[in-house]
Amino acid sequence: MIDYRNILVLDDDNITTLLLQNTLKESFNIHILNDSTTDIVSYLTTNEISLVLLDIDMPFRNGFEVADVIKSDNITKDIPIIFLTATNDKSFIVKAFDNEAVDYVQKPFNKLELKARINTHLSNYIYLEKIKKQQDIIYAQAMNSGMNEILMKISHHWRQPLSIISLSAQTINIENKLGTISKNEVNNLCKDITKIVKELSDNIDFFSNTYANENILEELFIPEDFDVLIDVLNNLFKEDLLEIIVENNIKESMTIKLNFSAIKNVIIKIVTNSIEAYNLFDMTNKKLHINISIIDNKLEILLKDFAGGIENQNIHKIFEPYYSTKKNLNGSGLGLFVSRSIIRQQFNGELNIENHKDKGKKGVIAQIIIPL
């Protein structure tokens, strides 16, 4: 269990560090550093530091530079920093907040004021950490739920081809024993089996790579990799009679390095939501338009259905955790909450969903934006 009372004092002045230690030691676990060139990220994570008291004026590397290192790392970026300064120069104070400090304390400091500020910022940090843990739990629940849905669809989808393989193998075995099958017929049946096995194998590879590499950067080849994704979507939703219409506005072949597996996961969730909406209203003409573009050095993927849309009074709720629309709306709130979290946290991008109306037909447009 994390002890949120761990505080780091980074100051090259021994008198200041001694004073801070004596002032705070009854309420907090004080860690002292005098060398600003220390590997600060490693130190913070190893010692589970929850707040940093950071001197601005230090040799070799000043407090602003140390703060930049802390805030540039995903693991330590949320740790609150309170700058310590002997100056009342407003430009220093402005720069402190520009470096994402939560506060500053002027030397010589008031002991009660210092403790009060530390307690306030620690409380906020603990609250944010609890929210992050809750989001991790929600994310895990959603991933398990989404994975179960995909596995159920795959198993249902595979019953027919597996039955064909089994029947073909039995036919070869029985008719071979009876001597009623020719070599040409055996070859044709074997070719059919090989073709079906390859399709199933390709699907296994696709989903294995998607879920195993969800946090790994990959090279995305356009349009080749998107073509593979579309093929899998067509295969996966074949029994749902979904017609996928693709418009690729990226005219030249190109390679982009990003986490395409995570994007595939989000797209599958969005397509699944559209299918559920079509099925809810017993629609037979199921269409999904997918538009791929690069605009202002951003990858934009649009997914547009015509499944009735979302009631206007509820559309602002769809990204809330545990808000479900499966009973009478398009999409599942938990899946969309996690999908937006993936796009924002892993790509610094955005996932937007809005209603649209085209030639009298209502539906939803999902917009995925990924900075390149």
Image (cartoon, rainbow, N blue to C red):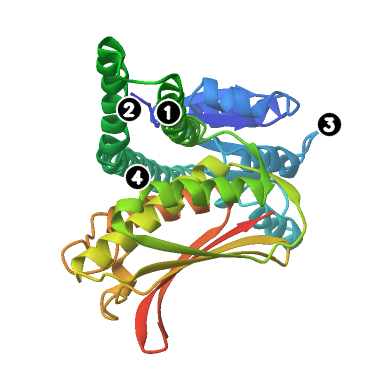
Depth check, mark 1 against mark 4: the one in front is 1
Tell me the SS state at disc 4: helix
Depth check, mark 1 against mark 3: the one in front is 1
Which residue is outermost to the left? 327
Between the residue at mark 1 and the residue at mark 4, the CA separation in whole angstroms equals: 39 Å
| 62, above or below 41, in the image | below
Between the residue at mark 1 and the residue at mark 3, the CA separation in whole angstroms equals: 63 Å
Depth check, mark 2 against mark 1: the one in front is 2
Look at the numbered discs 2 and 1 and tell me whether their residues touch, using CB distance below 8 Å: yes
Q: Position of residue 14 (x, y in %)?
A: 68, 25
Kind of residue indicated by mark 4? Gln
Tell me the SS state at disc 3: loop
Depth check, mark 3 against mark 4: the one in front is 4
Kind of residue indicated by mark 1? Val
Q: Mark 1 = which residue? A: 197
Q: Mark 3 = which residue? A: 60
Which residue is outermost to the bottom? 360
Q: Mark 2 = which residue? A: 165
Please name the residue shown 65% across and 42% down the image.
Answer: 72
2 or 1: tag closer to the N-terminus: 2
1 or 3: tag closer to the N-terminus: 3
3 or 4: tag closer to the N-terminus: 3
Q: Position of residue 328 (x, y in %)?
A: 18, 69
In depth, the one of 159 and 188 nearer the eye is 188
